[in-house]
Structure formats: structure tokens, C-alpha cells
Image (cartoon, rainbow, N blue to C red):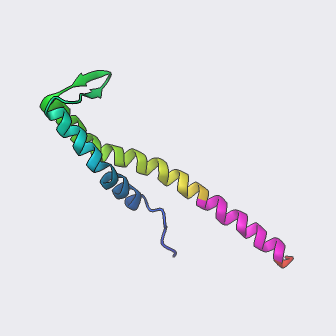
Amino acid sequence: MKENPFAFKNLFWAYTFGSMPFMLLGSFLSLFNVVPVYFNNEPHYGFEGFIIMILFIPFFGLIMGFVNWIYLNFGNYLYRKTFKLIRRDQTGS
């Protein structure tokens, strides 16, 4: 069986580690009362904002990984079906 190039696990870790520096920067800026973290349209500063941003890191990876997993696997499915039809037409079968 072929390995899935768009495995959810790979997408999850890529989005989690890709967004981590920005989320950590935002969490430290919130911790030192520089920039608020908006959660439910309310600004949060200090330790509360820090915790919200830290907890948002895996949640962001989960949501973005899931959405892109669906998108990429659907595109891969269409790609394989389209080229199967093209190859069949070229061979004359």
C-alpha cells in the first residue's frame, strides 16, 4: 500500500510547529501587557492571555491540519481519477 503523502499527522505537526513561534511571541507580549489576546471579543492580558495563547497552539494545528487534510486528499483523489481517465483514452481502451 502506498504511503499517503498528506497524512494528517504530518500536517498537524507542520502547522503546530509552524505557528508556535508566532503564538509564543503573542503569549509573551500578552504576559507583559504589551498586546492583548482577544478571546470571545474580550481582551485578556497577563497570565490569562499567556495561557490562552499557549492552549491555542495545538488547537490551531488541529483545525488547520484537518481542513488541509480534507482539501489535499480530495485534490489528490480528483488528480488520480482524472489521469486514470486520460491514460485510458490515450491507450484506446
Q: Is residue 18 above or below residue 44?
A: below
Q: Position of residue 68 (x, y in %)?
A: 48, 51
- Image quadrant for the C terminus? bottom right
Outermost residue, bottom side: 91
Q: Is residue 62 depicted above or below 43 in this figure?
A: below
Q: Percent x, y for residue 37? A: 26, 30
Q: Main secondary structure of the magenta part?
A: helix
Q: Quadrant of residue 90?
A: bottom right
Give how far across and how far down residue 32 sits, in percent.
13, 33
Q: Is residue 13 above or below residue 56?
A: below
Residue at 52% from the left image edge and 74% from the top image edge: 2
Whether 79 is among the magenta residues is yes
The residue lying furthest to the front in this view is 34
**Is 92 within the magenta?**
no
Exactly how many numbered labels are in the figure? 0
Q: Residue at x 42, y 47 (%)?
A: 64
Using the rendered image of the protein, determine whether residue 51 is visible from the camera's viewpoint. no
| Residue visible at 19% across and 36% down in the picture | 29
Task: Decide which of 42, 82 is in the foreground and name it.
Answer: 42
Which span is picked out in magenta?
76-90
Observer able to see residue 78: yes
Position of residue 78 in the picture relative to residue 69 (left or right): right
Farthest right residue in view: 92
**Where does residue 53 sit, x and y in percent of width and height?**
24, 38
- Is residue 78 shown left or right of residue 51? right
Q: Left or right: 83 with respect to 22?
A: right
